[in-house]
Image (cartoon, helix red, strand yellow):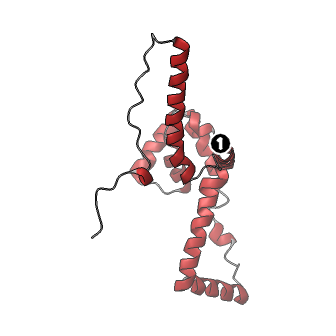
Amino acid sequence: MKWIWNRCRRRQEISLFAAGALGQEEKIELERHLAVCGECRNHYAEIKTLTAPLAGWEKNLSGIEATPASRMRWGSAVHDAGAPSAMGQSALKNFWRISWEELIWPSRGAWAGLAALWVAMLAINVSLSDHGSDAGARASSTQEIMQAWAEQNRVLAELVQPSFTLPAPPPNLPHPRSQKERSWEIL
């Protein structure tokens, strides 16, 4: 985490220099920079201590050979991986595994919160919905509303006495489809 606070942006070059993978001009320029920058010099020393044991890995591990059984397993694994049916299945399996690991698992708290929110919204929707209404009840409700309106106007007129005029009925409310007039005829 120390590299975040470093103002010098030559970490990658230092790593390549420690591995011996820089060209001659870049190497000379980086050596000049290391002579001036203490933070980069410390980073180079850390990288060099890590890479020194790995520098001669070919000499140290030259005597190690794979057993015939492991060679057979590797060969069959490579052969099976190249089969067309295995590729389709593994791609789908990898898609779900990667989706789970990258999208869902790191933010499982957010997904759980969203799921709880959806459950709460579903419960509220079910408790507020009107289960007893059907199409016939809705069709007659418009007539009931108009009758209640007329009754309220009549009661209001009686209370206020003859000096009060009745208000105009509400604008034309749409009629249910079952009560609409049909202007066409079947021949």
| Residue under the point 70% across and 79% down | 63
Q: Pinpoint residue 61: horizontal percent, then vertical percent.
A: 68, 73
Can you identify the residue that label 1 sits on?
128
* Closer to the camera in the image, 95 or 135: 135
Q: Depth check: 23 or 156 in front?
A: 156
The x, y position of residue 85, in whole percent, is: 55, 84
Decide: is 109 above or below 154. Answer: below
Q: In the image, is 106 to the left or to the right of 12?
A: right
Quadrant occupied by the N terminus: top right
Q: In which quarter of the image is residue 164?
A: top left
Expressed as whole percent of the image width and height from the top left, the position of residue 136 reads: 55, 52
Can I make out residue 49 in this image? no
| Rendered location of residue 103, percent (x, y) | 60, 54
Amino acid identity at mark 1: Leu
Residue at 65% over, 71% down? 59
Figure check: 99 above or below 158: below
